[in-house]
Amino acid sequence: MSNRHPLFKPLIFVGGLVFGFGLGFSHMARPEVVVNFLLFEDLGLPFVMFGAAIVSGIAFALLPRIRETAPLTGNRYERRLKPFDRNVLIGGAIFGVGWGLSGICPGAAYASLGVGNITILWALAGMFLGAYAQGYWRSRRAERDSTAVSAD
Amino acid sequence: MVTDVVLLQAAAEFFPNGISRYAVGGLLVGLGTVLIYLGTGIPAGASTFLESTLSYVSDQSRFQQYVASRDWRVLFTAGIILGALAFAATFQSGLITSPLYEPGTTGQLYEVAGVTLWTTDIQPWRLFFGGILVGIGTRVGKGCTSGHGVCGVGSASKTSLVGVLTFLTVAIGTAQVVAALGVSP
């Protein structure tokens, strides 16, 4: 959007820098380390995921009590709540097979490129293909549903 | 005293690389998320970048709903890549050392212009097919390890907790089966 605060994009970028540095430092950008966790050979991963969740959780709990809206967007401070349905289980299971097979997830894959992992381009290509396939299928289904409704 | 020794041995076995690099890295990942949330109110996840970026090249309705956020998501991802490069240029290159950072022995190191870079030993077919499933699953399942795992769990969202438990359990099972079939690395 064009009417965003001039600091909006710089802040997003700096947040990404810190986020990516943390993924590098924690070795989550190394698929081997993730696979080693899943094989119970190095249990470090939960310290990354839940450590990050605790830090962000404190902000998600406190900010809404301190201020109504965020200074750069005017968005209300809200928690990240998504409606539960079957897709959470189906998608989570598909994601789990992919994560277990490859040791990569989206954020860590971008960071992996940053630490020099050229081979991760295979995973990035796969992720975009997968995201495109599900988007294509869901767009078609949405079109079909809306024409079915308008035909009534 | 005896329990201390037993605990230490268990820790050495299950945490061959210590816990500090994981804990510090996790705090930084959380801090990056908090910075963005503080200024914008957005609980950022990494996987929506896939669909929002596809909106530049595809007219499908599923991707077009992310047009409003696609510019900043590109910046977020560019930040992640460059932040990881900053890590490579400092700690990975040995320019900065810290007792909190354990280097590790996985994969292959190589040098470009004085920067120590790293590349994986995991086979390309695993990355590619795993990537396809990650790409489908994260979008159908409404989030990934950062969206559900960090922001969702941080929000005490029941949906995200169920999502994380689902993909964690399935991933452990998958990795065990893949290893049992003799696939390595």
Image (cartoon, rainbow, N blue to C red):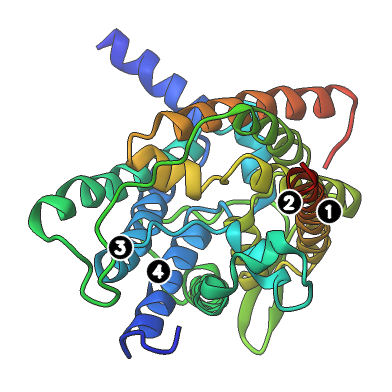
Q: Is residue B104 left or right of residue A144?
A: left
Q: Judge depth for marks 1 and 2 and give the one in front.
A: 1
- Quadrant occupied by the N terminus of chain B: top left
Residue at left offset 68%, top offset 25%: B170
Question: In the rendered structure, are the residues bearing label 4 and label 2 in contact, judged by CB atoms less than 8 Å apart?
Answer: no
Q: Are marks 3 and 1 in contact (CB under 8 Å)?
A: no
The answer to whether dots 1 and 2 both sit on one chain is: no
What percent of the width, then of the height, locates residue A41? 61, 29
**Chain of the residue under label 3:** B
Instruction: Please state which amino acid type lies under the numbered disc 1.
Output: Ala
Can residue A104 be seen from the camera position used here?
yes
SS class of the residue under badge 3? loop
Q: Mark 4 points at which residue?
A: A18
Which amino acid type is shown beneath numbered disc 2?
Gly
* Picture layout, residue A31 above or below residue A69: above
Q: Name the residue under label 3.
A: B41
Q: Which amino acid does label 3 sit on?
A: Gly
- Quadrant location of the C terminus of chain B in the rendered image: top right
Q: Which of marks 1 and 4 is nearer the N terminus?
A: 4
**Front label number (3 vs 2):** 3
Instruction: Indicate which label's residue lies in the foreground, 1 or 4.
Output: 1
| Closest to the observer, A32 or B115 | A32
* Residue of label 2: B135
Q: Which amino acid does label 4 sit on?
A: Val
